[in-house]
Image: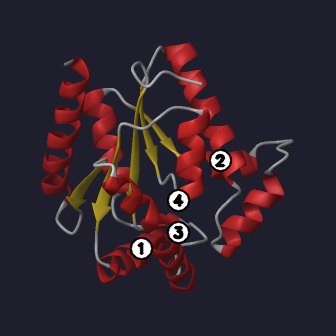
C-alpha cells in the first residue's frame, strides 16, 4: 500500500500500563508523528453507528481476546490514508500493535514495512500497581485485577514472540519503562532522533 521510503512507521509495544500512550504523546508533540492506537481505533469503531464490527469488537474486549487482525489492519490502513491525504503526514506511531506474529507479517505485507519496534520493558508488579491505580479513575472496563491478569497472559504468550522476531532482525529498540516519565522519554528521544537521522542519510 505505501512505500517504506516515504512512510515511516514505528510499532510501539509494551505490557498494559508500561506508559506507551504517555510516551507516544510526547513523541507526537516533538516530532510530528501521527499516533494510531489500535485499541482506541477499535473502541471508536465499536461506538460508531452502523459499524459491521461492533459486536465482534465488544466481545473480544470483554474477554481480553485479540480482535481478528483483518479488522484491526483495515482500521489502521484507513486512518493512515486519511492522515496522508488530509494532512500530508507520513510518520506514524502504531501503539499496541502488532499483538501477534501473524498481525506483524500481514501488516508489513499489506500496508508498509515498519522501521523498528519501540519496546517499553517493565516488570509485571510495576504494571499491576499502575493499572489498578489508573482503574480508580479511568472508567475502563478492563482496568480490574481479573482483566489485567488476562491481558498479561495474552501479552506474554502472543506479543512477546513478535518482539523476539524483530530482535532477530535488529529492529527492536528497548527502553526501561520502570523509571519516571522524564527519564524514560530522554531515552525515547535518543532512539527516535537516531532513526530519523538514518532516514535522511
The tag on residue 158 is 3
Circles 1 and 4, Cβ within 8 Å, touching? The answer is no
Residue 6 occupies quadrant: top left
| First in residue order: circle 3 vs circle 1 | 1
Q: Secondary structure at mark 3?
A: helix
| First in residue order: circle 1 vs circle 2 | 2
| First in residue order: circle 4 vs circle 2 | 2
Q: Residues within 10 Å of mark 4 (few under 14, many from 20)?
A: many
Q: Label 1 belongs to which residue? A: 131
Q: Label 2 belongs to which residue? A: 72
Q: Label 4 belongs to which residue? A: 99
Left or right of 44 on screen, residue 136: left
Place of residue 66 in the rendered image (x, y in percent of width and height, measured from the top left)? 64, 64
Q: Is residue 164 above or below residue 106?
A: below
Left or right of 156 on screen, residue 110: right
| First in residue order: circle 3 vs circle 2 | 2
Residue 183 occupies quadrant: bottom left
Place of residue 19 in the rendered image (x, y in percent of width and height, measured from the top left)? 33, 59
Place of residue 182 in the rendered image (x, y in percent of width and height, measured from the top left)? 15, 53
Left or right of 111 on screen, residue 135: left
Foreground residue, 64 or 199? 199
Q: Residue at x 53, y 80 (%)?
A: 144
Circles 3 and 4, Cβ within 8 Å, touching? The answer is yes
Q: Is residue 116 above or below residue 146?
A: above
Query: Could you tell me how far apart the alpha carbons at marks 3 and 2 are, in whole angstroms?
Result: 16 Å
Query: Could you tell me how far apart the alpha carbons at marks 3 and 4 are, in whole angstroms?
Result: 6 Å
Amino acid at each position: 500500500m505505501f512505500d517504506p521510503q516515504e512512510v515511516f512507521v514505528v510499532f510501539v509495544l509494551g505490557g498494559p500500563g508500561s506508559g506507551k500512550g504517555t510516551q507516544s504523546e510526547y513523541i507526537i508533540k516533538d516530532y510530528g508523528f501521527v499516533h494510531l492506537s489500535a485499541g482506541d481505533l477499535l473502541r471508536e469503531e465499536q461506538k460508531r453507528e452502523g459499524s459491521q464490527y461492533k459486536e465482534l469488537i465488544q466481545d473480544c474486549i470483554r474477554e481480553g481476546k485479540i480482535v481478528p487482525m483483518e479488522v484491526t489492519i483495515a482500521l489502521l490502513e484507513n486512518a493512515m490514508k486519511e492522515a496522508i491525504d488530509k494532512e500530508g503526514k507520513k510518520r506514524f506511531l502504531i501503539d499496541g500493535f502488532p499483538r501477534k506474529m501473524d498481525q506483524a507479517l500481514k501488516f508489513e505485507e499489506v500496508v508498509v514495512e515498519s522501521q523498528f519496534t519501540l519496546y517499553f520493558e517493565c516488570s509485571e508488579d510495576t504494571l499491576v500497581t499502575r493499572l489498578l491505580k489508573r482503574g480508580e479513575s479511568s472508567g475502563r472496563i478492563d482496568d480490574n485485577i481479573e482483566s489485567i491478569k488476562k491481558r498479561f497472559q495474552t501479552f506474554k504468550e502472543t506479543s512477546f514472540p513478535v518482539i523476539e522476531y524483530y530482535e532477530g532482525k535488529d529492529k527492536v529498540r528497548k527502553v526501561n519503562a520502570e523509571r519516571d516519565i522524564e527519564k524514560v522519554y530522554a531515552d525515547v528521544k535518543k532512539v527516535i532522533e537516531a532513526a530519523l537521522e538514518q532516514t535522511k542519510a
